[in-house]
Amino acid sequence: MSNDGFFEKVYKVAQQIPHGRVTSYGAIAKYLGAAGSARMVGWAMNASKLNENVPAHRVVNKQGLLTGKHHFDGTNLMQQLLESEGILVVNNKIQNLEILFWDPAKELL
């Protein structure tokens, strides 16, 4: 599968993350049958800047850290977007991750 095809599959999953919830790069990779490809999901999120319909700000690392924040315009845009959805971020980390976490393997049947 080409990167373009994989990226499109990643975007289709990301577009289904509900407002006010987050998921991880690894959870998307696992859902797509590509466990171990979390970094490639990250590359897809970075490349999604051209697609405003992809809520890349809702994808964080497995500990809830905003590891992709430096790919957003401005210093705190990723955090600001999350906070605008009611998500509390302290020291670049999602608070209450276990409550806010959206697992595509469980949510998309």
Image (cartoon, rainbow, N blue to C red):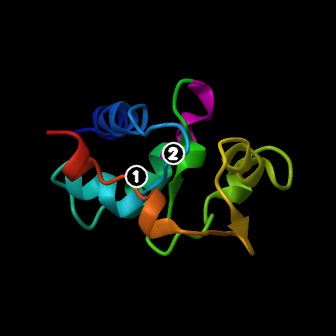
Q: Is mark 2 on a helix, strand or loop?
A: helix
What residue do we see at 31% from left, 59% from top? 27
The residues bearing labels 1 and 2 have C-alpha atoms spaced at a distance of 6 Å
- Which residue is at the front of the view, 80 or 87? 87
What residue do we see at 72% from left, 50% from top? 83
96 over 56 or under it: above or below: below
Residue at the spot of label 2: 45
Residue at the spot of label 1: 41
Q: In this view, does 70 lie to the left or right of 38?
A: right
What residue do we see at 56% from left, 25% from top? 51
Asked if residue 48 is among those painted magenta in the image, a careful observer would answer: yes
93 over 88 or under it: above or below: below
Q: In this view, does 49 lie to the left or right of 40?
A: right
The magenta segment is 45-52
- Residue 69 locus on image (x, y percent): 69, 57
Determine crowd level at label 2: few under 14, some 14-19, many 20+ residues with C-alpha closer than 10 A: many
Q: Quadrant of residue 99?
A: bottom left
- Residues tagged 1 and 2 counted as in contact (Cβ below 8 A): yes
Identity of the amino acid at label 1? Val
Q: Quadrant of the C terminus?
A: top left
Q: Main secondary structure of the magenta part?
A: helix
Determine crowd level at label 1: few under 14, some 14-19, many 20+ residues with C-alpha closer than 10 A: many
Q: What element carries label 1?
A: helix
**How many numbered marks, from 0 up?**
2
- Residue 12 locus on image (x, y percent): 34, 31
Identity of the amino acid at label 2? Met
Q: In this view, does 24 lie to the left or right of 3?
A: right
Q: Is residue 94 left or right of residue 72?
A: left
Asked if residue 51 is among those painted magenta in the image, a careful observer would answer: yes
- Residue 84 locus on image (x, y percent): 73, 42
Q: In which quarter of the image is the N terminus?
A: top left
